[in-house]
Image (cartoon, coloured by chain):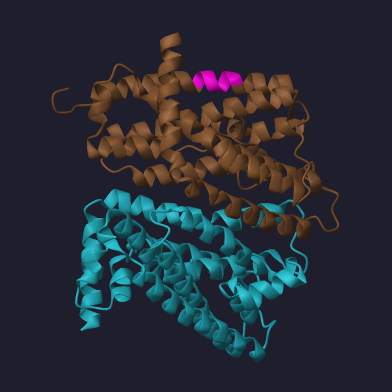
Chain colours: A brown, B cyan
Amino acid sequence: MRRLTAVISAIGFATYKEWAAFRSHMAASLLVGPVMFLVQVFIWKAIYEGHDTLNGLTYQQMLTYYGVASLIHYISFDFADWNLQMLVRSGKFVTFALRPLPHWLFALAQKIGHRSLALWVEVLPVLLLFIFVFGVNLQPAAPGWALLSILFSFLMNFMVNYCVGLTAFWLIRAEGIRRVFLLLKDICAGVFIPLSFFPEVLQKILFFLPFQFITYLPTRVYGGEYELAGIHLSLAQAVGLQAVAVAVTALAMALLYNAAMRRFTGVGV
Amino acid sequence: MRESLLAAVLRTKFAEQMAYRSHFIISVIMLIIGDLVVPLITLLVYKSGASFPGWTMHEALLIQAVFALSKGVAFPFFFGMVGTTLGHVREGTFDLLLLRPRPVMLMAMITGFDPDDFGRLFSGAVLFVYALSGMSMPGGGAWLQFGLLFLASVTMLCAVSLFLSGMLFRWVGSSRVFDIFDAFTSFGMYPGTIFSKSLQNILTYVLPIGLIAFVPAEALLGRSGWAGLWAVLPAAGFLLLGMVYWNRMLRGYTSAGG
């Protein structure tokens, strides 16, 4: 266990240093995030004219939703799918197949390193801008549950994306499918609009899909209340449900990973 | 001569895409779905009983349809140069474009031609017809104004692609320029009247994002009149500025020699 922790730390630290050389790439979020948020402020200010609440959310709650969703997006941002597909397509995956460490663990360690850098380059500055420039209330209702929920969101986003990346073992060029899937994932996760705005039937379907656990559920847990498809859950229940979903997705990823490894062929492997 | 060059590039690009037909089809579908996300949000907002004050759902969708249509024209022909510059400068292969006996800007634009992006034209057309079906048909004058302003809209996107592409000669390999584009142009996908007066002025005179969709849509709805055609001028000015900027940035391109 200690050795595994050391390996993960080493990979994470190497990734951190590698990306620190390209920190302006991440720092672009300091412009993109607030600009996107400013658009949302104007949109919802206009929409809320003459309305106190819309689908159970007040104007302030809506701004908090978008603020928290943006921050969760920065924390759990992932491109494991792109990376894996590139490795498979270019044949470089063979170097990972020879290592005494499953690739998914390597990719997770990379993500930890990458996002650790993002914490101070992207998350913290954007958080401060949201609070002090836009005056958004970003104080979590229950910090412990919020932190746990964001941690699960981090893992869930990684596992879903990694599963998409694994399709490269079966498809010659899966870039199109990857992009379609990721877009649908964002829609179903509530990145663009809270899921409570969707029709009742769709909400019921979305409740059982894994995507809400990436953005919608952690954002609502952060705000202190969870409701979807008429189902109200306490924070403990919501995070518990998220934990179960993460465990099920982890199992699915492991099965898919093993099937992919059986299918993989490379020179000398 | 240039026409045959364009035809040759189009043929090659389509042939390239046909080597991965399923990928091409999926990419087109993806772009269609992608362009329908914002209209979907608008639809959900209106279905929940709310609205953009002073705008019916079909009118608001018309702005987003014009935006998609404009992208459907500008992206296949001009916007590919952003990706081309990004890739070539990072790889150090931009020199290949400099060696060709054609203007570099034209070569960067033409090699970036992307047939996938025609999918945007389809989603824009579908949305446009849907939006028009919910309102009274505009008259001939409105269509004429719209046509001219639509040209200005495409010109504007062409200018933006020049700025983004030019930026990449210095900001090597940063794919975040696409995020910057999405962030700033998102102002243009909604009725300009929802923004504060000062921001409306910025979006009209300083950074004419409103010109991409809001101004042409307003003309089609008969809300702006002939005076609205002044907007063609900032678009032309912006394009000229973009060309100057791109060429200045190109001069700063050092290749592998430093």
Q: How many marks?
A: 0
Tell me which secondary structure the magenta stretch mostly adopts.
Answer: helix
**Foreground residue, A66 or B173?**
B173
Q: Is residue B98 above or below residue B45?
A: below
Residue B157 at x, y percent in the picture: 48, 72
Quarter of the image for residue B75 reads bottom left
The quarter of the rendered structure image containing the N terminus of chain A is top left
The reply, left or right, for residue A210 in relation to residue A134 is left
Residue A189 at x, y percent in the picture: 58, 38
Residue B222 at x, y percent in the picture: 67, 83
Q: Which residues are magenta?
A: A243-248
Residue at the image point whose x is 17% and y is 22% from the top: A269
**Is residue A246 shown in magenta?**
yes
Q: Is residue A247 above or below residue B29?
A: above
Q: Is residue A129 above or below residue B3?
A: above
Residue A111 at x, y percent in the picture: 46, 31
Q: Which residue in the rendered view is the most extreme toward the top? A: A1
The reply, left or right, for residue A258 in relation to residue A183 is left
Residue at the image point whose x is 40% and y is 26% from the top: A11
Quarter of the image for residue A148 reads top right
